[in-house]
Amino acid sequence: MVVGMSRAWVVLLCVLAAPAYSSAQTNDNKSLAPYIAVDAPVFALEHVELVDGTGRAAVSDQTIVVEHGRIAAVGPSATTAVPAGARVLELAGHTVYPGLVGMHEHLFYSEPTSSALRGLVGGELVDTAPRLYLAAGVTTARTTGSIAPYTDLNIKKDIDAGRVPGPELDVTGPYLEGNPPLIPQMHVLTGPDDARKMVDYWVNEGATSWKAYMHITPEELKAAIDEAHAKGEKLTGHLCSVGFTAAAEMGIDDLEHGIAVDSEFTPGRKEGECPDNAERYLAEHVAMDSAPVRAMIRTLVQRHVALTSTLAVLESLEPGHPPMAMLLREHDAMAVEAWSGVLTTRALIQERAAKSYWPALFKKEMQFEREFAAAGGLLLTGCDPTAYGAVLPGFGDERNLELLVQAGFTPEEAIAIATRNGAEYLGRADRVGTIAAGKQADLVVVKGDVAKDITAVERVETVFKNGVGFDSAKLMESVRGMVGLR
Ligand SMILES: [Zn+2]
C-alpha cells in the first residue's frame, strides 16, 4: 500500500515536472524561426541545375520562381522573368530537386539496447526524427508502421500548425501484427474481426495508411485490406507469413523491402507460415530471372501493387556496410549509447562475415528492383530507421538515392523514385513530387551536380517546404547528441 502510494506520487511528480512535449516549449509559429533561412513571399532560385522529379535528364542554368508557396515559373535563366521585388538567390553550382516523398519512414528508432543479440525495442524520436527528415530534404513522409500512434498523430498536428519543423506526414496506424510480435509495443491481432476493429478505431483517430506485419494471418490480412479500402485508405506490408503473390491477389497496395523478405519461394513453406530460412534460401538458390520470380513481378504489376525499396537498411545488414564514412556522417546527431550500440552490432556482423548471405541477397534485391521497375512496377523508397540503428531518419533517405544509382538507375530516375512515385502512390501528384508551375514549392537545394555525382545529395543546404526555406545545418545542429534519446 505504502509502496503503491509512493509510486503514484513519483508518476504524478513526473507529469507535473515535465513540460508537455512540445506546446509548452513552442506555443506559436515563431518557434520555427531559428531554422528558417528564406521566408519571402516571392523569390527566385537562379542558375540552378534542375532535376525535376519526372525522371528526365537534368537541365542546366534554370530559374525557379516561387510566389506565396507555389511554383510560379520554371525555365531557362536567360528567358524566365523574375517579378520585381522578388528575393533572388544566386545558386550557380547547386542542384535543385523536389522535396523527397519518403515512403518507409518512422518516427521511432531502434533503442540503443537493440542489437543482433537482444532484439528490437522502438524508442519514439519525438524531437529528432521530424527535424532529421526535413534537414535531409524529406518534405512528405509516410510513417509506415507506428509504435506510438497517438504520439505520431500529435506530432503531425504540431507540424501542420507550424509549431515544430518536419515533413508533411501520412500517419500510418499501429502495425497489424500476428503472433509473435517482433517489437513488444505491437498489438497481437486475435483474428479478422480484431483486424477490422483496429483499422476502424485508428481511422477515426486520424491514421491515414496501414501496414501489415510479418506474422499476420492470411485471414487477418484480407480483412484489414478490405476494411482499409472501405475507408478509402491504402495498406502496405512487410510480410513473411503471406507471400507477395498471395498478398497481391488479396488486393494489397504496396510491399515493403522487396524480394529479400518474400518467403513464398522457400521449399515446403505453407501459406500463413513464416519460415526461418527464407532469406538464406533466396540468397543461395533463387535466380532473379527465373520463371517464378518473373511471374511474381507480373502479378504485382498487373494488380498495381507498388514496391518500397529500402536499400539503406538492408545494406546495414551486410558485413562492412555502410562504409564508415557514411556512418560517421551520423555520429554528431547520435547519443553516445546509440553510437556505441551501432558499432557493437556492426562488429558482430563483421565477425560472422564468412557465413553471411547478405552480400548475395543485397545484390539480388538490387536486381529485383530494377526488373520490377523495368516491367512497369511503381517503385517507391524510404529509409526505415530501424534494424540495429545504423540508418538514421533522413540520412537513410539520402543513402537510398546513392544505392538506387548503384543498382543501375540514373540519378534522375533515382530522384523520380524518391519523389514523383511516392506522390503518385499517395494521390498527391497534383501538388508535390515534381517541379513544375502550379506545384507546391517543396524544393531541395544541394551543393554540386547530382546528375554527375549522386553523393551531392549528402550536401543539402536549404529545404523549401511550402515555399519556406529551412536551413539544413541549423536543423542538424538542433538534434546534436539526441538520436536514441528523444
Ligand atoms: Zn519499417
Image: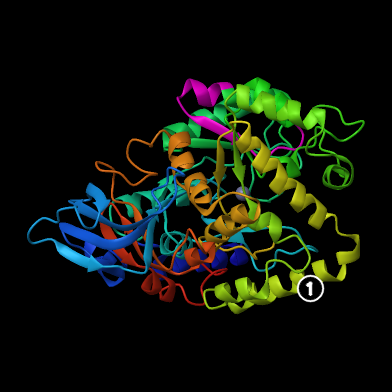
Amino acid at the residue labelled 1: Ala
- Count of numbered tags: 1
Residue 240 figure quarter: top right
Viewer-side residue, 130 vs 265: 265
Of the 4 image quadrants, the one containing the N terminus is bottom right
**434 sits left or right of 346 in the view:** left
Q: Nearer the viewer, residue 213 or 142?
A: 142
Q: Is residue 229 visible?
A: yes
Q: Position of residue 360 (x, y in %)?
A: 82, 53
> Residue at the spot x=35%, y=49% of the render?
157
User: Which residue is pictured at 33% across the width and 35% down the height?
Assistant: 430
Tag 1 secondary structure: helix
| Residue 266 is one of the magenta-drawn residues | no
State whether residue 226 is above or below residue 71: above
Q: Residues within 10 Å of mark 1 (few under 14, many from 20)?
A: some
Establish whether ligand 1 lies closer than 8 Å to the Cβ of label 1. no
Question: 333 above or below 155?
Answer: below
Identify the residue at image location x=42%, y=59%.
137
Against 393, residue 93 (above or below) is: below
Which residue is nearer to you in this view: 200 or 397? 397
Visible in this render: residue 166? no
Query: Relative to 35, is 253 above or below?
Result: above
Q: In this image, 84 relative to 399: left or right?
A: left
Residues rendered magenta in the picture: 226-242
Task: List the residue tagged with mark 1.
Answer: 347
- Residue 164 picture quarter: bottom left
